[in-house]
Amino acid sequence: MAFVELRSLRREFGETVALDGIDLSLEQGEFLSLLGPSGCGKTTALRIVAGFDRPDAGTVLVGGKDMTRIPPNKRDMGMVFQAYSLFPNMTAERNVEFGLKIRGLHTSNRRGKVEELLELVGLGHARKRYPHQLSGGMQQRVALARALAIEPRVLLLDEPLSALDAKVRVQLREKIRRIQSRLGITTIYVTHDQEEALSISDRVAVLSQGHIEQVGPPGEIYDDPATPFVADFVGTMNRLEGTVEGDGIVAYGETRLAIAAARGRAQGERVMVLVRPETVELGPTNGDGTSSTITGEIISHTFLGANMRLKIAGATSDLTADVPASRAGAYPVGMRVQAHFPGETARVLTLEELPAPAPVDH
Amino acid sequence: MRRRFSWGAGLWLFIGAAYFLIPLVATLLFSLKSNETGQCCSLSSYGEILHDPAFWKTLRLSLILAVETIVIALVLLIPTVYCVHLKLPRLRPVIGFLALIPFVVPPIILVVGLLDVFKGSPSWFYAEPYGFLVGAYVILAFPYIYFALDAGFRAIDVHTLTEASQNLGANWRTTLFSVILPNIRAAALAGAFLTLAIVMGEFTIASLATFDTFPIYLQYINQNKAYPAAAVTLIAFAITWGAMLSLLLVGRDRAVQLGGAK
């Protein structure tokens, strides 16, 4: 039986439907991320689990017990907030101690536990410092220690890294994951950052407009998006509009694309072929009949670190390809190239299902 | 890098300081004149005031009234402002408007109205300064305490701090006393000292309601004894300055701790 269950959660704010029947379950010790754009309802869902908001309909169960009407201070859930939430009048040590004090733990036991937790988050040396004497990353680490101190049944993290700079964000998310695995705490992590969600979760639930689009392990979410929204939101995707012309063949402008996922589709069906930029290779057609080839001119380079993202203006529409940065010099802007991708890796969706394209996120 | 001294800024500072200091120095010199000879310098006026039982009696009364007013106003307003910031932010402009009313209504209108409203009330309230005057002073203090608290609550993230506290198991009382109050202490003190200054100087209501408070005594001395009047004025100044200095010291300490914590 699932340890945490959200059943048919619904929440409206006036005319806006923030949650439109959310069903979700977590096993004990699982790390689940709620991923979605701003306003998709992920924070609302987390606040309902924490008890800061009540659903208009639906229930929250933890360990089989209905928690929906239980006030937040009786739920035994540790939460790390997006905004810096340390009590400014207390040192790091006293912040971590706060929950233990409320639980009536004896001073000597409290002290040991606080020390242990601050060591765990790597801040044993900073326990006498006030929040304003700590960096953003350190403050969130203290907040994590404070949330863990009460030995919560569920750990809730509401975009805890969004205010931090990129490097600290990566370090801290790895630390969170390590600590979570070590302590085996069931965790719900809210984020709009797909990389963050995919890199640290056991499973990811992608939300859009108050409902769940897909729940699954990170690999599945990335490689096999169940809906056009997930395909569009998670990672960058080329969207090639075409018509099914035969079994596994899609007509894209003048080109015929051999796409495995198009097999069994009706002749003449309008489809969108979804291709990840990292699967696109530049060069000559391999001629084995499994690759799909598009000819075009390179119009821009965008440096992504290890990779270079090339934009290719094709006859029908633009195409994006990621190549290793070290090889990008071989493809200068203005060069005409042939882009091809393995037909097995492309996804196909019926055109009517697709939303308007979102801006490409670099 | 050290800033260079600017003569222009120095001149303005000197003019500003002179504007405030000259009357005080003049008052000080005047207060040091002997009651008998009218010559400088004697502390006889200070002696006379400090040996006058009416001075201590009225000063004590006004200080007690100030403390009572501050306590009642804070007890009424801290939970109110907390609640408004947390649950009813839309009410903020309404309360802000209400808080301006004591500024708009002249004290003479206020006292006549209050005397009428409280006419039927028990004599322990109506006939005693600790009842009637405090009732009026809480109204006068409303804008000062409200706006100070409002600013204090705006400077902290009330929602997140409250939710963080509750999430750790705290009830409303613990949240208010352990988390919220320590973080709005400077604001509450600011309101409290403004209230102290108002109560220590309020004349109209006390006079019309015929209670002998410190400002009434000050007025009496002013009318009857020239040199001691200057001395009592400076003593009153010293009390107010002492209060303001305490505020500055306490407030500065808190500002250092809260800085950058948001």
Image (cartoon, grey):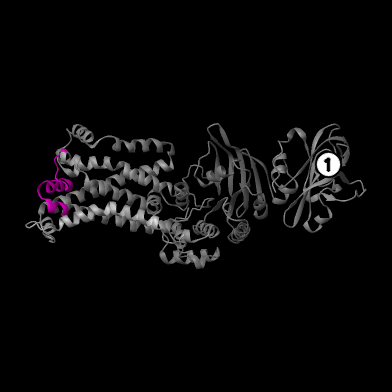
Q: Residues within 10 Å of mark 1 (few under 14, many from 20)?
A: some
What's the residue type where badge 1 is placed? Gly
Judge whether residue B235 can be spotted in this image: no
Residue at which label 1 appears: A314
- Tell whether A321 sits left or right of A172: right
**Is the magenta region chiefly helix, strand or loop?**
helix
Which of the two residues, A210 or B78, is positioned nearer the viewer here? B78
**x, y percentage for residue B215?**
18, 46
Highlighted magenta segment, given as a residue range = B208-230
* Residue B55 is one of the magenta-drawn residues: no
Image mark count: 1
Which of the two residues, A273 or A337, is positioned nearer the viewer here? A337
* Residue B210 is one of the magenta-drawn residues: yes
Which of the two residues, A201 or A139, is positioned nearer the viewer here? A139
**x, y percentage for residue A92?**
47, 61
Judge whether residue B158 can be spotted in this image: yes
- Tell whether A341 sits left or right of A37: right
Q: Secondary structure at mark 1?
A: strand
Q: Quadrant of residue B37?
A: bottom left
**Which residue corresponds to the image point at 29% horizontal and 35% vertical from the top-left?**
B104
- Tell whether A56 sits left or right of A351: left
**x, y percentage for residue A125?**
50, 68
**x, y percentage for residue A68?**
51, 42
Q: Chain of mark 1?
A: A
